[in-house]
Image (spheres, rainbow, N blue to C red):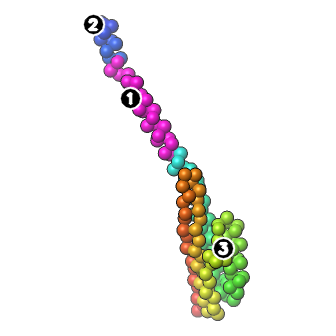
Amino acid sequence: MEMSDNAASGTLRERAPRRAEAGRTTFKALLSLAFLAAVAFACVRVIPVYVNNYQLHDYIQTQTPFWLNQRATPEAIRNNILAKAQDLNLPVTADNVTLEVSSYRVSVTIDYVVPVNLIVYTLPLHFTPSSSNRSI
């Protein structure tokens, strides 16, 4: 059985997307790609700050027992913390570091904000790592 030209062209028209639908699909794909690119960009900017904060927190937790045993002065502890924060590119100042140092206890609290530039918005990330250790 042979198909006529009208029947054949009718089936082709049914299968081929309309111009408006094809454009809509392209726009959705571009919009999806733009969204994924924005999320990737934000992750590239934000994740390193969280990693650096984790490293600073880990540093003060591992050093607190040593500072207690060495009877380190508050100035020495503060200088060590500020040097580590500078190595990690964190905006920690001496005013951000709160210390409680005695012969039987060392407590460290750091309260700081890292502004992350996301081009259209500056995201302020607030961190408060702390550690405390007592002698037995």
Q: Provide residue 26's location: percent of width, then percent of height.
A: 45, 32
Q: Describe the element under mark 1 as helix, strand or loop.
A: helix
Does residue 19 appear to the left or right of 7 in the view shown? right
At label 3, counting other C-alpha atoms closer than 10 Å, the crowd grade (few under 14, some 14-19, many 20 or more) is some
Q: Which residue is mark 3?
A: 93
Q: CA distance from mark 3 to mark 2?
A: 86 Å
* Pick the front one: 65 or 57: 57
Q: Provide residue 90's location: percent of width, then percent of height.
A: 64, 66
Q: Provide residue 1's location: percent of width, then percent of height.
A: 27, 7
Kindly tell me whether residue 7 is visible in this rendering: yes
Q: Is residue 29 above or below residue 13?
A: below
Residue visible at 70% across and 68% down in the picture: 86
In front of the other: label 3 or label 1? Answer: 3
Q: In the drawing, what numbered circle is on residue 1?
A: 2
Residue range of the region highlighted in magenta in the rendering: 13-36
Quadrant hosting residue 18: top left
Q: Describe the element under mark 2 as helix, strand or loop.
A: loop
Mark closer to the chain start, 1 or 2? 2
Q: CA distance from mark 3 to mark 1?
A: 57 Å
Mark closer to the chain start, 3 or 1? 1
Q: In the image, is residue 18 part of the stretch drawn in magenta?
A: yes
Residue visible at 42% across and 33% down in the picture: 25
Q: Describe the element under mark 3 as helix, strand or loop.
A: loop
